[in-house]
Image (spheres, rainbow, N blue to C red):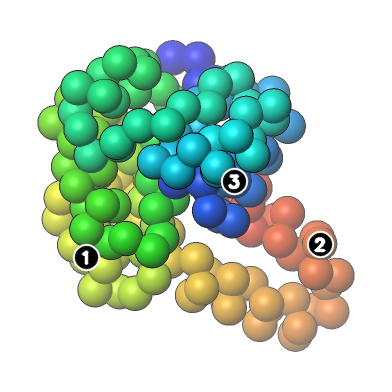
Amino acid sequence: MSDRYLVIGLGRFGMAVAVALTDAGAEVIALDSDMNLVEAIKNRVAYAIQLDAADPQALRSVDAHSCKSVIVAIGENFEAAVLCVAALKEIGVGHVIARAISQRQARILNAVGASEVIEIEAEMGKTLGKRLISGTPATTAVVSAVAKR
């Protein structure tokens, strides 16, 4: 399997993940239903596409199953995130990382098949606490937290 990733949801988190993966040399397909967000990233990733990521047929059209990992970075519409994870599992995607903003959301995303769930606020809170105690500069702590994932 190549270093090919699919990032679904191009808010601040999804955009940052897509750009970081691209900067590290990965091939990135970035998806969102909002064409303005697709336009904003199109020159930073291999492919930027507007589509409904809850539609299994649409996900097949971008060869989602051939990606090393799919990151569901949808933050504001939890129902869309759940439907997206379910659709990805339906078409046979092996590794799905999903974003959650609460423990309850994390449990639900795990229940529908997410391989890994990231609670961004909780993880960054832990990272900040560790950084403050250790005196590590903020940029080093953030890079270390991202590298561990």
Q: Is residue 56 above or below residue 133?
A: above
Kindly identify which residue carries mark 3: 15
Residue nearest the viewer, comparing 32 with 67: 32
Kindly identify which residue carries mark 2: 139
Quarter of the rendering occupied by the N terminus: top left
Q: Secondary structure at mark 2?
A: helix
What x and y, as percent, mark residue 5? 49, 28
Q: Secondary structure at mark 3?
A: helix
Q: Quadrant of residue 104?
A: bottom left
Q: Is residue 92 visible?
A: no
* Residue at left offset 70%, top offset 56%: 144
Q: Is residue 56 left or right of residue 133?
A: left
Residue type indicated by callout 2: Thr
Q: Secondary structure at mark 1?
A: helix
Kindly check if marks 1 and 3 are in contact, taking CB atoms under 8 A apart as contact: no
Residue nearest the viewer, comparing 32 with 74: 32
Q: Earlier in the sequence, mark 1 or mark 3?
A: 3
Q: Is residue 71 above or below residue 79?
A: above
What x and y, as percent, mark residue 85? 24, 44
Q: Is residue 30 left or right of residue 98?
A: right
- Give the CA separation, mark 2 to mark 1: 30 Å
* Residue at left offset 35%, top offset 32%: 51
Front position among marks 1 and 3: 3
- Give the CA separation, mark 3 to mark 2: 18 Å
For disc 1, the neighbor class at 10 Å (few under 14, some 14 to 19, many from 20) is few
Q: Is residue 137 visible?
A: yes
Q: Earlier in the sequence, mark 3 or mark 2?
A: 3
Residue type indicated by callout 1: Arg
Kindly identify which residue carries mark 1: 107
Q: Earlier in the sequence, mark 2 or mark 1?
A: 1
Residue type indicated by callout 3: Met
What x and y, as percent, mark residue 34? 45, 43
